[in-house]
Structure formats: structure tokens, C-alpha cells
Amino acid sequence: MGKKRMTESTYRIQGATGEWEVVIGLEVHAQVTSNAKLFSGAATAFGAEPNTQVSLVDAAMPGMLPVPNRECIRQAVRTGMAIEAQINKWSRFDRKNYFYADLPQGYQISQLYHPIVGEGQIEIVLDEKNPDSSTKVIGVERIHVEQDAGKLMHDQHPTSSYVDLNRSGVALMEIVSKPDMRSPAEAGAYLSKLRTILRYVGSCDGNMDQGSMRADVNVSVRKPGEEFGTRTETKNVNSVRFVMAVVEHEANRQVDVLEAGGKIVQETRLYDPDRNETRSMRSKEDAHDYRYFPDPDLLPLVLDDAFLDECRASLPELPDVKRKRYEQALGLSAYNAATLTADADTARWFETLVAEAARIQGKSESDVAKASANWLLSELYGALNRLGKTLETSPVGPTDGAELLALVADGTISGTIAKQVFEIMLETGDKPGKIVEEKGLKQTSDTGAIEAAVATVLANNADKVEQYRGGKEALFGFFVGQTMKAMQGKANPQVVNELVKKALAG
Ligand code: ADP
Ligand code: MG
């Protein structure tokens, strides 16, 4: 724990009567990574043909009984542990009753009164460039598990609507934050960080464009220091950028209403990304509208210590801990550590690179970490961006990357040549050692050859030699550059420096 530091946000909206502060709470629905649904054995694969993953339970055939999927429960518990939350060893499922064509049961099995996970917390970074000194802790109220609904399709036929029940009964975690965020940036940072954690834990794939994660965005405004204002809730927002846009738009709309003497009504709104605006959908319903009651088909969920121990033991190193370790044990800058740990796959790639680089060079990981990080974040990322690829589809893997770094570290090739070798690796997929060998790219410290090159450069630039000797010392770099060029980049830069110096002095 010990995460108490709060940085006051200075995000304010200027109204005619003064400044307004924005208050935000997010309810995030995250689809649990599991092979089967929450209460049935039907598959959960994304993109399957409509209604091919529907069991009798999901279709709500009379007499069917739900059976909780242990893996879904386990993933929710592991997620709770990852945000340092209270895990409730006793929880219970409730029925939330409502009628809609995508809900065959006529109720959703959820957890209102006794959620499986209680209060927790998520630390967000407010200044990307300075991740050590600008953090804020956002409280999490609870996480409960519940069933997803089916999907209505209104655009398949001119006069009919269809329903796809593949998603019906899929397990969701609803992760409810406290109203602790105060700006669009904080809301965006919270959602990104939550996604990072879920992907580390492996409890949700975080694919927002496939609907694996969607946020209900609660927004209210108040004069700083006053009580919370009435909030609106904008449903099913499916990207970080959209969440930030909703907060910004909705807060400004509310300020306009209030400044004009109006009142905010508690309501559910919809976001239209094409027009970047929210629209009223319905007035807010209260818990009693749903006639919640304990689901009589399900026993309370009781977790024993062995189960909890297994959940805890199965957690990976989490992003905050990893980031600190990259800084403290590997000596990376705070910014690089934050960048490399923002995604579980990136961190894994980096760790393989470092381990391989250390192994090949016979050095410790901390000795090779900085060069590895710099190469990954500048050279490799630059190339991947250019090629429209990601680490996952990278033509160069961490082992070949490590070999390239080793060739530079032991002086076989210069940094300049390394860039050329890397380009060839990207194109051909060949190993760096083989490329260096075949193309004769080894760096030379052969003083005879370098001396000859220096002599030619000086002879061809007699005027500049004159100027240099007359005091224009900045020309030194020019001679070094020309010599390197004459040596096709293969000369050892240190030797070139020395020999140029010697020749100019002579
Ligand atoms: P309900 O039970 O009506 O769904 P909750 O108390 O569970 O309401 O809150 C739902 C979400 O709304 C939470 O994420 C919470 O942080 C947020 N929230 C509550 N009050 C406010 C407010 N005044 N302004 C902004 N967000 C709020
Ligand atoms: Mg709620």
C-alpha cells in the first residue's frame, strides 16, 4: 500500500459565474478471459457465426440450471488481488430483472448486494514524462461478476431485427471506480492503467475494439469545494479517447445548463462518436426498478483459503512493481521504465531481449539493460512504425536483436553499421552475424588503412586544414566524418579520432 499521494488536478471549466470542477467515476465492463461462459459450457470465441455458441442455459430454456464456471470466478479474484482489493470469501448472485429482446432469461445474473471483490485502488500517472513524481491513486469501489446479454442486429433486414446470443451469458467483471477522477486526462489514464493491469493478470484481453472492455462514464460538475453535483451516465464507451471526449463534452454541457439557470437530471446518455456529442437515452433507473433478489438457482459463493492462495500465487509481477524494478535494478530512466511496462507483451519482449543480450555478452542484465531499452524504443519501434507492424508481428525477434547489440558492444561493428545491418535483418530475416560476415561489415582498427584514408582526406581538403590550424577547431568533426565515409563506416571511431588528431597536429 502506501500509495497516498494526491496531486490536485487543476483542470477547470470557466463559466460566467466562475470555475467549475469535474467529477468522474467509471464503471468498466471487462469480458473475462475464459473458454466457457459464466454459467454454461458454451464457447466464447470472438467472431463466431451468430448463434453458434449458445447452450440451452444461455437461451434460457425452461428448467435449465446455471453452474458457476470456476475459471471465471478465479479470474475475478486474481483481478481483485492485483488492485490490492478486499476479496470477499462469501458472495452471492442476484437477479436483475428487466425485459429486453437481447435477454432471453428476462433477468441478468449479477451481484448487487454481496460482490466478490470489495474496495481496491489503482495508481495512475498524470505526467508521462515524469512518471515518478506525478501519480494519483483512484479508489475502486467493487468488482462483481455478471452475465453479458446478447446482441441485437437491426441492419440485416428491412423490416426485421435479429438477435445473436453468442455473447449471452459470457462472464463480465464490472469494475466500479469511486468518483475520484477530476479531468478527462485522469479518466483516460485510469482506463489505460486498468487495461494494462487486466492484460498483465490475463483476466481480460483488453480488446476495446472487439467490445472486451467498455466503460460507463459518470460525470458531474461542481464549484470547487462544494458537494458533488448530480451526475449523468454515458453508456458503453469503447475507447480511451472516447472516454476523454465524453468527459469533456458532458462536463461542458452541464456547465452550460447550470450557468443558464437549469438543472442536471440524473439520466443515462449515449455517445455519438461521429458527432462527438452525448444524447439523452432514458432517465436513470434505481436499483428497485430492477426488483433485485438473490438467485434461488445458485448457492452463495464461498471461497476457501487454498483457492485464494492459488489465485495469489498465480499472479505475475504487476506493472507498478515491474516499473520500479526496471528503474532501480536495471537502471532505466523513469520514462523508459514506464513505456516498457505499459503493456505486458512489450515487457515480456524486452525481458527476453535483456536476458539474451546478457547471456551472449556474459554480462549481468543491468549491464545490458540500457542499451537494450534504447535500441527497442528507438530503432525497433521506429522500424515497426514505418512498416506498420507491432512487436507481435516484428520481423526481428528478441534473440536476433540481442545478437546485434552484442556485435556493437564487443566492437565488431560500429553503431552506424548496426543500423545498416538492422535494415537488412528487417528485410531478409537473416541473423546479424551472418550479414556482417557476408557483407564484410566488420569494423576495422587497422591503423595502416585508416592512416591512408586520413591522409587522403587531408590532402583533398587543404583549405580546411589551413583553417583548422588557424584556430577553427570545429572542423575536427568534418575530418572524422570524411574519414569514416572513406572507410565506409567500418573504421573504429576511436582509432579514427586519434589518427585524425595526430595527422592534423603533424
Ligand atoms: P448506482 O448505484 O446508482 O449505479 P453508484 O454509487 O454505484 O451508483 O455509482 C456508480 C458510478 O458513478 C461509480 O463509478 C461512482 O464513482 C460514480 N459516481 C457516483 N456519484 C458521482 C458523481 N456525483 N459524479 C460523478 N460520478 C459519480
Ligand atoms: Mg451502478
Image (tube, rainbow, N blue to C red):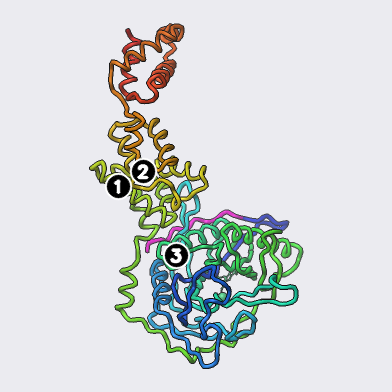
Q: Which mark is residue 356?
A: 1
Q: CA distance from mark 3 to mark 2?
A: 28 Å
The image quadrant where one finds the C terminus is top left
Q: Is residue 33 visible?
A: yes
On whether ligand 1 comes within 8 Å of the CB at mark 3, the answer is: no
Q: Which callout, 3 or 1, points to the residue nearer the camera?
A: 1
Ligand 2 position by quadrant:
bottom right
Per the image, label 2 sits on a secondary structure element best described as helix
Where is residue 242 shown, x and y percent of the image? 61, 59
Q: Residues within 10 Å of mark 2 (few under 14, many from 20)?
A: many
Q: Residues within 10 Å of mark 3 (few under 14, many from 20)?
A: many
Disc 2 marks which residue?
401
Q: CA distance from mark 3 to mark 1?
A: 28 Å
Proximity of marks 1 and 2: CB atoms separated by less than 8 Å: yes
Q: Residue at x 48, y 79 (%)?
A: 42
Residue 334 to residue 409: above or below: below
Where is residue 172 shown, x and y percent of the image? 50, 74
Residue 411 to residue 373: above or below: above
Q: Is residue 197 left or right of residue 287?
A: left
Query: What amino acid does circle 3 point to?
Result: Leu
Disc 3 marks which residue?
198
- What span is in magenta? 1-11
Where is residue 454 shown, x and y percent of the image? 36, 14
Query: What amino acid does circle 2 point to?
Result: Gly
